Image (tube, rainbow, N blue to C red):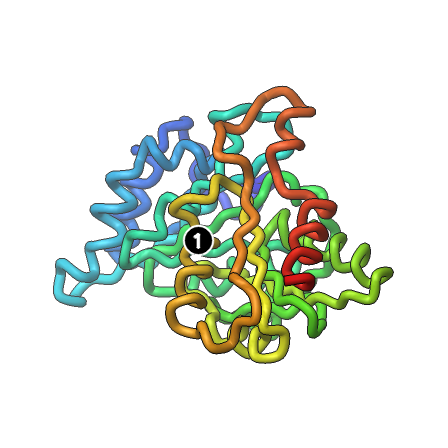
Amino acid sequence: MTEGLQARFGKRVRDTPIAEQAIVGMAVGAAIQGLRPVAEIMFADFAGVCFDQIVNSAAKYRFTSGGQTSVPLTICMANGSGAGFGPQHSQMGENWFLNIPGLKIVTPGTVEDHYGLLRSSIRDDNPVLFFTHKNLFALKGRVPAEPSDEALIVLGQASVVTVGSAVTVVANQQMRHRAVEAAQLLTEEGIDIEVIDPRTLVPFDMDTVITSLSKTSRLLVVQEGPPDGGWGATLVSRVASQHFELLDAPPTLLASDNISVPFAASMELASIPDAARIATAVRQLVAY
């Protein structure tokens, strides 16, 4: 994704060794000193190597300095399964950081969202973890030929991808596209679902989800990655505890199987929600 940047921008772009602790450590220091660095970790899985610097330095520095120092840092990482990279290069690392105050978490699902959210992330005065799904690298889209503020997307603003009244389906990144496929299948059966892409997990646009639930009264959250401790389980919990009166059926989470991502292609694909599984989950909610 960074091909050609060093030739164009020179010393502003550092071609570093693949040493995550060094990359993030220097980026945190640069941010504290007033720059707006963008650090790239090739695979989100290796955020574990520099976990301490992200969690105990970047996320907490503004708080522990009493607001005297901000950390305007963006860390870009490639996440996700379905591309045959095996269990150590296919995880959904964003779920690891949901419990850390001070971090913003961005998960774009389209080319346009990637452009608008990345520009907003770099401008933000807080550390932002920016996850790009590997299986979406080949997506096509339109971005401005020149930098454009009109294309900026506010962090914490969800996107209503398809409009419907039967079930609210919340899904991001690869699952967003599979939910749209499911919506097309279900339309033939007379079931119209409303697909919402949160785009950012922190901050999370709860208002858009609740507005949709007020219409559909049924919620399906589709999350890539194991079910426990993820953003999907958090959303289901919030809706059940804070908006129970809106529901006509139990809020449901459809996630990947609770296993390490297999390397074998057939097993990997079978472990991740697809359009058919999403459609089945919707039918169960409609029939409840």
Q: Amino acid at mark 1?
A: Ala
- Residue 188 at least partly seen: yes
The N terminus lies in which quarter of the figure?
top right
In this rendered view, identify the residue nearer to me: 16 or 19. 19
Query: What quarter of the picture does the C terminus occupy?
Result: bottom right
Q: Residue furthest front?
A: 288
Q: Is the residue 134 above or below the residue 72 in the image?
A: above
Q: Is residue 34 left or right of residue 260?
A: left
Q: Position of residue 35 (x, y in %)?
A: 33, 56
Q: Quadrant of residue 111?
A: bottom right
Name which residue lies at 46% across and 71% down. Answer: 206
In x, y percent, where is residue 44? Answer: 45, 37
Q: Which residue is mark 1?
A: 233
Between 46 and 145, the one nearer to me in the picture: 46
Q: Secondary structure at mark 1?
A: helix
Residue shown at the point (63%, 34%) measured from the top left: 82
* Nearer-the-camera pick, 119 or 250: 250
Residue 38 visible? The answer is no
